[in-house]
Image (cartoon, grey):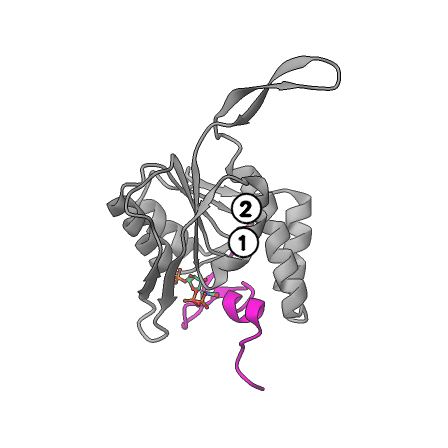
Amino acid sequence: MPTPTLHVSQHPAVLHKLAVLRDEDTEPKKFREVVRELSWLLGYEALADVSVKPREIVTPMEPMIASELGERIGLIPILRAGLGMVDAMLELMPTAQVWHLGLFRDERTLRPVEYYNKLPDSASVDLCLILDPMLATGGSATAAIEVLKKWGAVRIKLVNLIAAPEGVEAVSSAHPDVEIYCAALDRGLNEKGYIQPGLGDAGDRQFGTGKAE
Ligand code: PRP
Ligand code: URA
């Protein structure tokens, strides 16, 4: 059954850049560049329904009522891999606040472990965007959403580059109010919890920390 909260981009520019991202020959520098470009494109789609408010300006011709973002936005990158998505999102939403959340996936249990949390004392924004390139089992995303809801967030969107059906199912059944934006919905997970065909380990590929040959 289709998941109403899932938005998979069909934009040709997204499809083109995804191929570069997935390619095992793409080096970390190029990989980071493409993570950034894809984040910009997905952020653009994820923000399409954000409200704007009027802003009085004067053009060289005459005064006019223009528009500016009307919602306070919080960006929550999931460390480490989500870091690569922050700059592009800040270009789109220069007034957004950034709150880092450190989660890593225990390789044996595949359960998320929280190790860092830089959320302010209380929720002070209208919309939270969780940034993480990969949605695999959905454990990390679900944990992040729970942290944000406990803290008081009311409107949350999840932005991923690649999602697995298992992760989409986990997030959408536990949190049917959270919209998921991604560039691709892949086939599924392998026995180690990696997305197939995926792109490998998004953190390692960005930061060059893969296993030594
Ligand atoms: C990756 C990815 C997600 C998580 C997804 O992070 O960036 O946070 O795995 O998997 P899940 O949906 O099964 O929870 P990882 O734990 O490898 O940490 P890293 O970003 O520090 O490399
Ligand atoms: N985390 C990654 O970085 N890649 C996957 O395929 C799954 C989890």
Evaluate whether residue 154 shows in this view. yes
Indicate left or right for 120 with 89 as reference: left
Q: Determine if the C-beta at disc 2 is less than 8 A from ligand 1.
A: no
Q: What label does residue 186 carry, if any? A: none
Q: Image quadrant of residue 165? A: bottom left
Indicate left or right for 41 with 5 as reference: right
Q: Are marks 1 and 2 in contact (CB under 8 Å)?
A: yes
Which residue is situated farthest in the bottom direction here? 213
Residue ID for mark 1: 85
Tell me where the magenta segment starts and ends, as one range: 184-213
Give the residue displayed 66% in from the left and 13% down from the top.
63
Evaluate whether residue 9 shows in this view. no
On-image quarter of the C terminus = bottom right
Residue 90 is situated, as x and y percent measured from the top left of the image, at 55, 45
Give the residue displayed 36% in from the left and 37% down from the top.
155
Give 35 or 121, whichever is nearer the viewer.
121
Which residue is situated farthest in the right direction here? 61
Q: Amino acid at mark 1?
A: Met
In the image, is residue 24 part of the stretch drawn in magenta? no
Give the residue displayed 67% in from the left and 64% down from the top.
30
Residue ID for mark 2: 89
